[in-house]
Image (tube, rainbow, N blue to C red):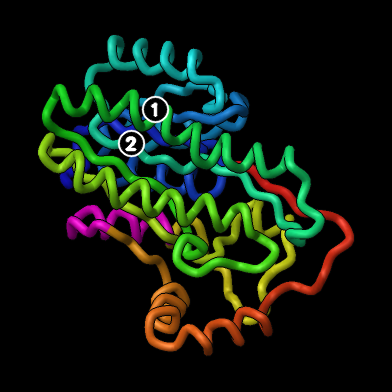
């Protein structure tokens, strides 16, 4: 994909991986970045950094779990700024907790944001991309979309679902000249890492490393972008020696905690 002169929409753009991707796209010559998140103040700070790089920005404060609001926002964006060439679904929420201590509202929130919110936005933009016969959609899954993690059961389930959703869309939208890509970072040094108990032996990557891996993957037309050697090793082990991976995960899993951890991007 050629990035220069294009328009991209990024959810979860106020911090973490979403913010890093926005800044990297600006450095690569993106014409306009549409930044979406719930925190307007943080979005404005990111927008200011991006505009200093010469890229135009639009910020939208939006709750992706509200379909009517999302529908109105996308219609207005398309009318005001023309086609969106690149959609990056980066917004997500997670609770870290023992499965036996999981609360239903936590599960509902993860499903609503990670899956239904992403589905609603993608559907609205993909329909418009299809009419233009061009576009690229990037769904941010996770290494946990390949290798499920103890204490992150619902989050892992949503990331597996995102990967399946991406694979289905890739085949279905190809006839409309729309590429659908999965980005699978390993544990990344964001607000999430500060709030959860780390898995022993796992070294977090930086958001900037993830963003650069995405750009490289888009340039090489990859359909799945695994980030970091730990991700490649874990998937290799999952495929060839799943019994060994089970032992490793048990040894690496965080010890039981009293208070559940939570993050949102």
Residue at the (52%, 27%) spot, across then down: 64
Residue at the (36%, 46%) spot, across then down: 165
Quarter that holds the C terminus: top right
Q: Which mark is residue 43?
A: none
- Determine crowd level at label 1: few under 14, some 14-19, many 20+ residues with C-alpha closer than 10 A: many
- Determine crowd level at label 2: few under 14, some 14-19, many 20+ residues with C-alpha closer than 10 A: many
**Residue 137 shown left or right of residue 41 in the figure:** left
Q: Nearer the viewer, residue 61 or 70?
A: 70
The residue labelled by disc 2 is 87
Q: Quadrant of residue 212?
A: bottom left
Q: Magenta region, mostly helix, strand or loop?
A: helix
**Residue 12 shown left or right of residue 56 in the figure:** right
Task: Please identify, in this view, whether the residue under mark 1 or under mark 2 is nearer the observer.
Answer: 2
Q: Confirm or deny contact between disc 1 and disc 2 (CB under 8 A).
A: no
Q: Which mark is residue 34?
A: 1
Q: Nearer the viewer, residue 245 or 41?
A: 245
Regarding mark 1 in the picture, which secondary structure is present there?
strand
Vertically, is 71 above or below 52? above
Regarding mark 2 in the picture, which secondary structure is present there?
strand
Percent x, y for residue 216?
Answer: 26, 59
Total count of labels: 2
Percent x, y for residue 200?
Answer: 67, 79
**Inter-mark Cα distance, 1 to 2:** 9 Å
Q: Which residues are magenta?
A: 210-223
Q: Nearer the viewer, residue 123 or 93?
A: 123
């Amino acid at each position: 994909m050629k990035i220069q002169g294009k328009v991209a929409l990024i959810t979860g753009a106020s911090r973490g991986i979403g913010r890093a991707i926005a800044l990297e796209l600006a450095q690569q010559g993106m014409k306009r970045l549409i930044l979406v998140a719930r925190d307007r103040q943080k979005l404005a700070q990111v927008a200011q950094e991006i505009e200093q790089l010469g890229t135009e920005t639009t910020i939208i404060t939006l709750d992706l779990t509200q379909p009517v609001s999302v529908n109105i926002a996308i219609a207005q964006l398309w009318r005001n700024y023309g086609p969106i060439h690149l959609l990056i679904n980066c917004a997500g929420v997670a609770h870290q907790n023992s499965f036996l201590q999981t609360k239903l509202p936590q599960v509902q929130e993860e499903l609503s944001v990670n899956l239904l919110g992403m589905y609603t936005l993608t559907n609205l933009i993909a329909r418009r991309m299809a009419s233009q016969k061009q576009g690229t959609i990037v769904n941010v899954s996770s290494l946990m979309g390949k290798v499920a993690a103890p204490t992150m059961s619902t989050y892992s389930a949503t990331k597996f679902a995102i990967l399946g959703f991406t694979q289905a869309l890739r085949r279905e939208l190809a006839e409309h000249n729309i590429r659908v890509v999965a980005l699978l970072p390993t544990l990344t040094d964001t607000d999430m890492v500060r709030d959860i108990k780390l898995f022993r032996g796992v070294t977090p990557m930086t958001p900037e490393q993830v963003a650069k891996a995405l750009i490289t993957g888009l340039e090489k037309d990859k359909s799945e972008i695994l980030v970091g050697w730990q991700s490649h090793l874990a998937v290799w082990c999952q495929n060839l020696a799943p019994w060994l991976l089970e032992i490793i995960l048990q040894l690496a899993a965080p010890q039981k905690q009293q208070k559940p951890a939570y993050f949102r991007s």
